[in-house]
Amino acid sequence: MNDVHGVARDQLRTIIERIERLEEEKTALTADLREVYAEAKGNGFDVKTLRSVVRLRKQETAERNEQQALLDTYMHALGMIAPDE
């Protein structure tokens, strides 16, 4: 970025403007997500559970199954669930 008054300055301005635009879009998307969760809550859905379902759907099936097996193992060790019959 030797040429502060030429191309480098224009390039820097372009990068900053792109970042600002993306930040604005991110803020708008966050607001949209809040609205959808609020709507779901208003319809009787549990928001915490919805967030968990969304997180789980992002995972591969094998990863999700492995996490569930570990959770079951830990809960069983703590006496929170009955052993398999």
Image: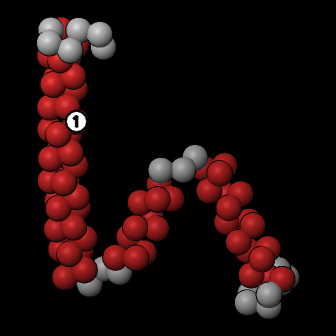
Q: Nearer the viewer, residue 8 or 43?
A: 8
In the displayed structure image, the side of residue 46 where residue 41 appears, left or right: left
Which amino acid type corresponds to the residue marked 1 in the rendered image?
Answer: Ile
Q: Across the whole image, how many numbered discs are drawn on residues?
A: 1
| Identity of the residue drawn at 21% across and 67% down | 34
Which residue is under mark 1? 19
> Dot 1 lies on which element?
helix
Report x, y in % for residue 54: 41, 60
* Residue 37 in the image: above or below residue 44: above
Q: Is residue 36 visible?
A: no
In the displayed structure image, the side of residue 68 where residue 7 appears, left or right: left
Q: Quadrant of the C terminus?
A: bottom right
* Residue 50 in the image: above or below residue 2: below
* Residue 30 in the image: above or below residue 71: above
Report x, y in % for residue 32: 16, 59
| Identity of the residue drawn at 47% across and 54% down | 57
Report x, y in % for residue 39: 18, 74
Report x, y in % for residue 46: 35, 80
Q: How is the image coloured?
A: secondary structure
Residue 50 lies in what quarter of the image?
Answer: bottom left
Q: Quadrant of the N terminus?
A: top left
Q: Residues within 10 Å of mark 1 (few under 14, many from 20)?
A: few
Q: Is residue 41 visible?
A: yes
* Residue 35 in the image: above or below residue 15: below
Q: Nearer the viewer, residue 64 or 17?
A: 17
